[in-house]
């Protein structure tokens, strides 16, 4: 078997490769890593091809003899790159896949931005049958387009496509910095869109943690997943007949409740909660389909998410770095 991986140098890609290469059931598989802005060190089982997935010749070379595709490469809020990577690149990969005599599965890692995560209100838990509703920006739009493209290739050509739709992926100390005030904040929403600069400075000095409130004034509930659990879902879906032609939500069993996080951090670390009103909506990404059909279970709940983030000691050679805007 030969697995093509795009986005292999990213957060999910790096964690996936380590887990995949160490698993006995995949010991006879080889990997082709298609890299662009960053690269990997080649090994006897990992061949590295450097180039853009928007380059037809590069994609054709990368797809030679491939039996499985794991497509994770993406751009965030970069309109100048979005069409080339997410639309043309996806199209070229799918075209090679449908023509391939060896391909068995094409797996796409999507995101809950395709259903608007906290930007749109859903009256019930978000399932795989819920309508796609991108939030403003090109990143969410590209994820909707990618999901629709693979769906249509299934309909048009009988392609065996699998989509894993994940919310915000956490690793290392990400969650701690997602809850921090000041210049070290990771991800969004940017505090400058919700509070004044003076308020942010004051909260940073106190070491406060945000207790976000939704549009109705209740504690916000937002979906997360730890990278280890997402990697577990990818491994469970890879070459699995139960994943044929299927879309799965891959998330924690319950969304993270900002009130529970604030209470937990106050009790365990004496951190003061700061209530912040937002225009966002609480949503619940339902992962029951993946638990039922793939036999997969997430192992990181909100307490484990907190403990892992606060206990993580970052190596001096591994500074926090933003690889993409947005």
Image (tube, rainbow, N blue to C red):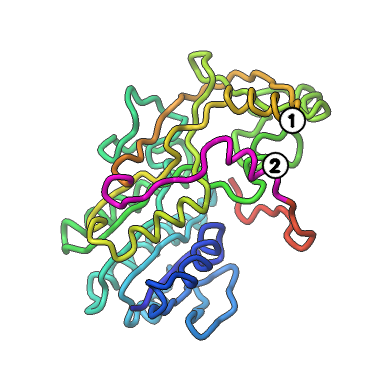
Residue 208, picture quadrant: top right
| Residue extending furthest toward the bottom | 44
Residue 188, picture quadrant: top right
Q: Is residue 310 magenta?
A: yes
Disc 2 secondary structure class: helix
Q: For this rendering, which residue is in front, 251 or 35?
A: 251
| Residue extending furthest toward the right | 205
Instruction: Describe residue 239's horizontal placement relative to residue 270 as left or right.
Output: left
Tell me whether the residue at label 1 lies in contact with that at label 2, contact meaning CB atoms closer than 8 angstroms: yes
Q: For this rendering, which residue is in front, 156 or 20?
A: 20
Q: Is residue 213 magenta?
A: no
The mark nearer the N terminus, 1 or 2, is 1
Q: Which residue is mark 1?
A: 269
Percent coordinates x, y for residue 61 in the rendering: 39, 82
Q: Is residue 257 above or below residue 253?
A: above
Residue at point 54%, 83% (across, down): 43
Percent coordinates x, y for residue 108 in the rendering: 36, 57
Q: Is residue 306 above or below residue 198?
A: below
Magenta residues span 291-312
| CA–CA distance in space, label 1 to label 2 | 10 Å
Percent coordinates x, y for residue 79 in the rendering: 51, 51
Q: Quadrant of the C terminus?
A: top right
Dot 2, how many residues are within 10 Å of its Cα: few (below 14), some (14-19), or many (20+)? some
Residue at point 52%, 47% (across, down): 226
Percent coordinates x, y for residue 228 in the rendering: 51, 53
Disc 1 secondary structure class: helix
Residue at point 69%, 39% (across, down): 185
Q: Is residue 22 above or below residue 320?
A: below
Q: Which residue is mark 2?
A: 310
Dot 1, how many residues are within 10 Å of its Cα: few (below 14), some (14-19), or many (20+)? few
């Amino acid at each position: 078997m030969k697995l093509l991986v795009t986005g292999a140098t990213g957060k999910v890609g790096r964690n996936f490769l380590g887990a995949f290469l160490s698993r006995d059931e995949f010991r006879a598989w080889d990997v082709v890593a298609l890299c662009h802005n960053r690269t990997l060190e080649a090994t006897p089982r990992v061949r590295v091809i450097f180039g853009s997935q928007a380059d037809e010749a590069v994609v054709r070379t990368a797809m030679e003899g491939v039996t499985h595709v794991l497509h994770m490469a993406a751009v965030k809020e970069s309109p100048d790159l979005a069409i080339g990577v997410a639309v043309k690149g996806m199209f070229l990969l799918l075209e090679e896949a449908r023509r391939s005599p060896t391909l068995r599965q094409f797996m796409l890692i999507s995101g809950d931005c395709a259903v608007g995560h906290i930007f749109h209100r859903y009256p019930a838990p978000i399932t795989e049958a819920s309508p796609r509703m991108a939030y403003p920006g090109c990143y969410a739009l590209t994820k909707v387009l990618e999901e629709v493209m693979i769906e249509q290739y299934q309909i048009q050509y009988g392609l065996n496509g699998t989509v894993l739709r994940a919310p915000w992926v956490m690793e290392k100390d990400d969650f701690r910095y997602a809850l921090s005030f000041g210049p070290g904040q990771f991800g969004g929403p940017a505090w400058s869109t919700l509070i004044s600069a003076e308020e942010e400075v004051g909260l940073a000095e106190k070491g406060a943690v945000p207790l976000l409130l939704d549009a109705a004034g209740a504690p916000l509930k937002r979906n997360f997943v730890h990278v280890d659990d997402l990697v577990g879902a990818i491994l469970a879906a890879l070459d699995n007949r139960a994943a044929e032609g299927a879309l799965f939500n891959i998330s924690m069993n319950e969304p993270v409740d900002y009130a529970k996080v604030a209470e937990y951090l106050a009790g365990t670390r004496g951190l003061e909660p700061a209530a912040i009103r937002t225009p966002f909506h609480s949503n619940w990404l339902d992962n029951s389909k993946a638990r039922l059909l793939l036999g997969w279970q997430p192992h990181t709940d909100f307490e484990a998410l907190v403990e892992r983030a606060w206990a993580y000691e970052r190596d001096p050679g591994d500074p926090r770095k933003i690889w993409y805007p947005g």
